[in-house]
Amino acid sequence: MTELMKYDAAIERFDPVLGIEVHVELGTATKMFDGAPASFGAGPNTQVTPTSLGLPGALPVLNRKAVEYAIKIGLALNCEIAELCRFARKNYFYPDVPKNFQTSQYDEPIAFDGYLDIELDDGETFRVQIERAHMEEDAGKNTHVGGGGGRIHGAVHSLVDYNRAGVPLVEIVTRPIEGAGARAPEVARVYVQTLRDIFRTLDVSEARMEQGNVRADVNLSLRDSPQSPLGTRTETKNVNSFRSIERTVRYEVSRQAALLAAGGTVTQETRHWHEDTGVTTSGRVKSDADDYRYFPEPDLVPVAPSREWIEEIRASLPEPGSVRRKRLQAEWGYTDLEMRDVINAGLSELIGETIAAGATPAAARKWWSGELARSANTQGVEVGALGVSPAHVAELAGLVEAGKLNDALARKALEGVIAGEGTPSEVVAARGLELVSDDGALGEAIDRALQSQPDVVAKIKDGKVQAIGALIGPIMKEMRGKADAAKIRELIVEKLGV
């Protein structure tokens, strides 16, 4: 079993340095270099052409929209946009790379020298320096059959789906992130959360981590002090949830600290994060750039975006995140703490879409930050992966506001939506959850409660109105929870004339 040092002890002894590479799949209609569809969820190997399969004689043609989206991302990250850049061949063999090389950018990226200011959980601002944002194509997808949990170890055979091969990507690479100290896991999480929100705001990607639209490679090294040279880093590949990013950093800090404290050395390697066990395991010795034998792509001309086009794109960018945050907070009427919690949980887009669908800001925040966030945490997934849409939440809030559901029944309806039973209205109808609207039936239940508890009735008539609470519970039980407590209170007051 891997030795670990307690995180606090590791941070006292060593200084962590991060480096994060984030890949975002661009939301273009077609792939980076051919006309195959770039949509998610189609049958295996149905969205391919000779180009994305790397067949002999097939030539690439650059997707202009992908270049536009890459420039948008670069500008949003305060980067310089290259007057001229080019693609290169990154040579390596994997079954999911049919050409035996990936068309990427190497020493001439489209965007470089940027930064991103992120807001940590307590409101403090931390600046992350961006080295580059470059364009490339995605690889296909391997599915390992017969092993444990879809892993290659112990698999009987593997299947390759080339639908994803050639999907446009932008890779954003940070400079070494120093000075985070004990907050390194938080910095890593918030940085990727902020990027995800930027991608969605720019409308360049669906940015759904559960579908692999956004993936993070987390580099981490330890050194004795901030004045010491950088240590040997590991790169944990394809971490695809905010929670996992934070846990990966904490684990690697503890693992590397124990190794160094015992006199060992850290191996420069790729590692894999295992959500089920909460550990990273060794992948392969990490290749340096020279090992990929980069050389300029001979089948693509250099990309030279005009200054006019770049400025046109800049003028079309939505308002910066910090400005938008303040505007939304004012529109929604949230306190500083409420807005910070929404941002930290990555819920601003979902809440905004829910409000646009008809919910009040208070109801939208209540359901996303409350019941849905708890369900996601219990299941160990991102809240967006629950299968509940903003339209569903707005519909649920509308049913509560219309008096058809109380909060308890609404939670049961939401459970049904998460379970895939349909929309809130469909779940309410199927499960028979709607509040009793028949005043006669409710009045009869109230009469029985008043007759059975004369002492409570006497207290109420004597002016102790709070004693009504002793009657509401039994009435709600008789009505099987399908009554509104406020309405019960109103009818009791009316019947007793108090």
Image (spheres, helix red, strand yellow):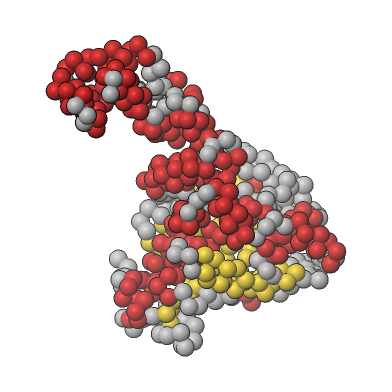
Q: Quadrant of residue 290?
A: bottom right
Image check: 448 left or right of 395? left
Q: Residue at x 69, y 65 (%)?
A: 74
Q: Residue at x 74, y 47 (%)?
A: 30
Residue 155 point in image, percent of width and height: 45, 50
Residue 324 point in image, percent of width and height: 62, 56
Position of 126 relative to 26 (above/below): below
Q: Quadrant of residue 247?
A: bottom left
Q: Residue at x 42, y 70 (%)?
A: 183
Along the viewing direction, whichever of 332 and 370 lies nearer the viewer: 332
Image check: 117 left or right of 298? left
Image check: 180 left or right of 315? left
The quadrant of the picture occupied by the C terminus is top left
The quadrant of the picture occupied by the N terminus is bottom left
Residue 52 point in image, percent of width and height: 71, 51
Seen as rendered, the residue at the extreme left is: 455
Q: Quadrant of residue 458?
A: top left
